[in-house]
Amino acid sequence: MSSWRQDLSLSAVSAGLVAVLVGFASSVAIVFQAAQAAGADQAMMVSWIFALGLGMGLTCIGFSWYYKAPVITAWSTPGAALLATSLLGVPITQAIGAFLFSALLTLLLGLSGGFDRLMRRIPTSIASAMLAGILLQFGLSVFLSLQSEPWLVGLMLATYLLGKRWLPRYTIILVLAVGLTACLVLNKMDLNALNLSISQPVLVWPEFDFGVLLGVGLPLFIVTMTSQNIPGVATLRASGYEQVPVSPVLTGTGITALLLAPFGGFAFNLAAITAAICTGPESHPDSKKRYIAGLSAGFFYVLAGLGGASVVALFTALPTALVASLAGLALIGTIGASLSAAVAEVQERDAALICFLLTASGVSFFGIGAAFWGLVGGMLTLLLTRAR
């Protein structure tokens, strides 16, 4: 087996960097809203970023190294959105108790092995269709951003096309470099407010209230499973990483959340969108060497956690169009591969298309996102068409 030094590549490292950049810049504001709803002060908000960055970093490094696959974890963005509305008026000590309750449920589900058995029953076509539906909006965002920022996004798009022609392994890092340079030249980025500082963790001792456990902790667990872990598993399966068992990963993220919840680590789960950046061919042509992207993402997550407020200020200083276009261009190859796998089996094509359309529609019922309903719709269609 080759060593990680032999497998190291700039394209994989850049994929990890882009994944962290997109993950932080696209949803860190929601995490701040959740912390504010819980009554966290400035020091506690920095502690939340520290705990989340450290937890994601360590789990990315540990899982990616052990399974030799790009296993990318993330905070629960739908969970953060849920917390931003459900924690109003809830003491932060009881909020931490709800985080611990959700983490315990995740740990118990991982130990039971039930989630792993369930996911293995989902055909590749359905999993790929769900992934394509999730990622479609990111692909479209490139051209929507082109309308609002034609010079910035136009340069990034041209760099992507030329890079795919001449330097395919380094395309995304070139796109990032050109995008950042264009932002500086066009004065799209204000770096004056940045200062260097190290995060200081703040420990909050939990309290357990039955109503808060059921009203916040249980929904946080359900939303994280349905909206994050199911698409995350589909991303790994669609990219051919069948050797990664789900149950140990759930167990590991549950333990991580139990340890870091008192510092603000409200939930950890498998990533889907940022994972797709690392599991696709842009990361590395050889799928066996893409685990370097997972290790790199973990390293940058740890740095982001340690940097706390400074790193968050940097990410929020980036133009929305740059982040959206960078994510969309990095995911084009994965979107294409997912669509191809989704419609490859003629007998499963109708089910896959319904799954894709439902997921891409963004519908939500009972507080559960479109990815789950796309999966349900695709599986029901598959059962009915097979019965016919």
Image (spheres, rainbow, N blue to C red):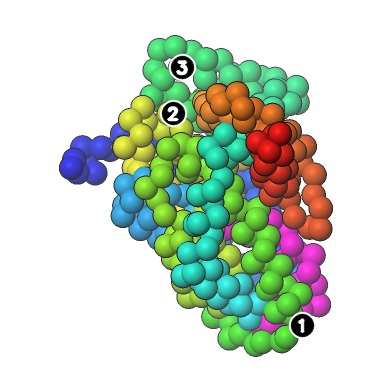
Disc assigned to residue 282: 2
Return the residue at label 3. Answer: 164
Secondary structure of the residue carrying tag 1 is: helix
Residue 147 in percent (x, y) is at 75, 22
Asked which quadrant contains residue 379, the reply is top right
Secondary structure of the residue carrying tag 2 is: loop
Name the residue located 37 percent from the left edge and 31 percent from the top edge.
Answer: 284
Quarter the N terminus occupies: top left
Asked which quadrant contains residue 61, the reply is bottom left
Identity of the amino acid at label 2?
A: Glu
Identity of the amino acid at label 1?
A: Gly
User: If you read the primary sequence from the N terminus, does the residue marked by circle 3 or circle 1 appear first?
Assistant: 3
Return the residue at label 1. Answer: 211
- Is 70 in front, or is 311? 70
Q: Nearer the viewer, mark 3 or mark 1?
A: 1
Residue 358 in percent (x, y) is at 75, 38
Q: Is residue 115 above or below residue 324?
A: below
Report the Cα–Cα distance between label 3 and label 1. 54 Å
Q: Nearer the viewer, mark 2 or mark 1?
A: 1
Q: Which residues are magenta?
A: 75-95
Residue 10 in percent (x, y) is at 34, 33
Q: Is residue 47 visible?
A: no
Quarter the C terminus occupies: top right
Identity of the amino acid at label 3?
A: Lys
Callout 1 crowding tier (Cα within 10 Å): few <14, some 14–19, many ≥20: few
Relative side of 29 to 294, left or right = right
User: Is residue 89 found inside the magenta-colored segment of the image?
Assistant: yes
User: Is residue 336 found inside the magenta-colored segment of the image?
Assistant: no
Callout 3 crowding tier (Cα within 10 Å): few <14, some 14–19, many ≥20: some
